[in-house]
Image: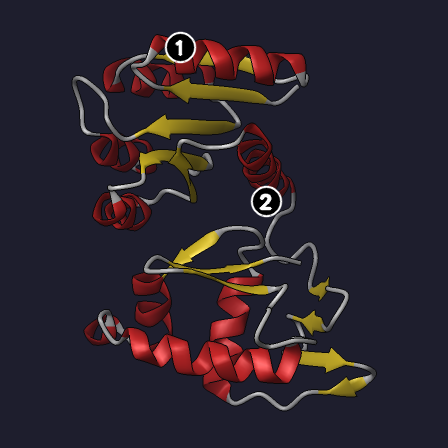
């Protein structure tokens, strides 16, 4: 059974999430403060953490940093629509994904399932990633579409590889820029727009309505298999 820790100081949200997740077969833990969340992660070692940023004692970003000091447990952040800067801070601190309040339960459950899948597949166990539009062979560093190898520049490949190795996960703009171009390029977001547009033209069936290389406006990019 998958164990989920829900961290929120709003009793109605804790109750609603506990009922919904328990009904779907999850083992649910709850915490209403940052200190209790850190203690639960250490003592119970949940498979996924759903974390509200607005906690009464410790800032949610500090909680993420505290967890990341020793654990790689997936963290899905719950954040208000007006907290876009804090979302970036949360992702930079090590959060894997975010859901904006108010949120739909179906969306949260989808993000939760994706987080669980990522922990179940070790990197390298699946060197070939197949979508309905193209196939990425991570070991051979090749992309095949309609039976033909697609030529990618080294930079295009680096961007694609980072996204494909994080299926379903939001990869922050700063992370992509730093990993591909280096730490001095963390604000050159126009680079990403250019290279993602090129990748979509080469790989997506309908580049103007991409199914696999998704933009999260102002935040980053997500690969959906």
Left or right: 130 in relation to 179 = right
Left or right: 148 in relation to 20 = right
Asked if residue 70 can be seen in this view, the reply is: no
The N terminus - image quarter? top right
Q: Nearer the viewer, mark 1 or mark 2?
A: 1
Q: Position of residue 219 (x, y in %)?
A: 35, 57
Discs 1, 2 touching: Cβ within 8 Å = no
Checking the image for residue 118, the label placed there is 2
Q: Residue at x 83, y 83 (%)?
A: 147
Mark 1–mark 2 distance (CA, rounded to whole Å): 29 Å
Q: Residue at x 61, y 48 (%)?
A: 122
Tell me if residue 31 comes above or below residue 150 in the rendering: above
Tell me if residue 132 comes above or below residue 203 in the rendering: above
Q: Look at the numbered disc 2 and give the secondary structure of its residue.
A: helix
Which residue position is annotated with label 1?
12
- The first of marks 1 and 2 along the sequence is 1
Q: Position of residue 35 (x, y in %)?
A: 24, 16
Asked if residue 40 can be seen in this view, the reply is: yes
| Residue at the extreme left of the image, as rendered | 57
Q: Position of residue 89 (x, y in %)?
A: 24, 47
Left or right: 111 in relation to 36 = right
Q: Look at the numbered disc 1 and give the secondary structure of its residue.
A: helix
Q: Quadrant of residue 53?
A: top left
């Amino acid at each position: 059974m998958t164990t989920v820790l829900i961290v929120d100081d709003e009793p109605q949200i804790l109750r609603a999430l506990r009922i919904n997740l328990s009904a779907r077969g999850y083992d649910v833990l709850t915490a209403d403060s940052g200190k209790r969340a850190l203690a639960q992660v250490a003592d119970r070692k949940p498979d996924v953490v759903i974390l509200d940023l607005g906690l009464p004692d410790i800032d949610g970003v500090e909680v993420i940093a505290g967890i990341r000091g020793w654990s790689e447990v997936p963290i899905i952040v719950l954040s208000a629509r007006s907290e876009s800067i804090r979302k970036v801070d949360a992702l930079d601190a090590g959060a894997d994904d975010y859901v904006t309040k108010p949120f739909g339960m179906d969306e949260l459950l989808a993000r939760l399932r994706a987080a669980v899948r990522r922990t179940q597949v070790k990197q390298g166990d699946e060197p070939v990633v197949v979508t309905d539009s193209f196939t990425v062979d991570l070991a051979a560093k090749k992309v095949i579409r309609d039976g033909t190898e697609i030529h990618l520049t080294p930079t295009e490949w680096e961007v694609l590889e980072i996204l494909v190795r994080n299926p379903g996960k939001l990869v922050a703009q700063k992370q992509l820029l730093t990993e591909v171009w280096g730490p001095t390029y963390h604000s050159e977001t126009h680079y990403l727009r250019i290279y993602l547009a090129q990748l979509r033209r080469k790989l997506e069936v309908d580049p103007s309505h991409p199914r696999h290389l998704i933009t999260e406006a102002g935040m980053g990019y997500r690969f959906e298999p």
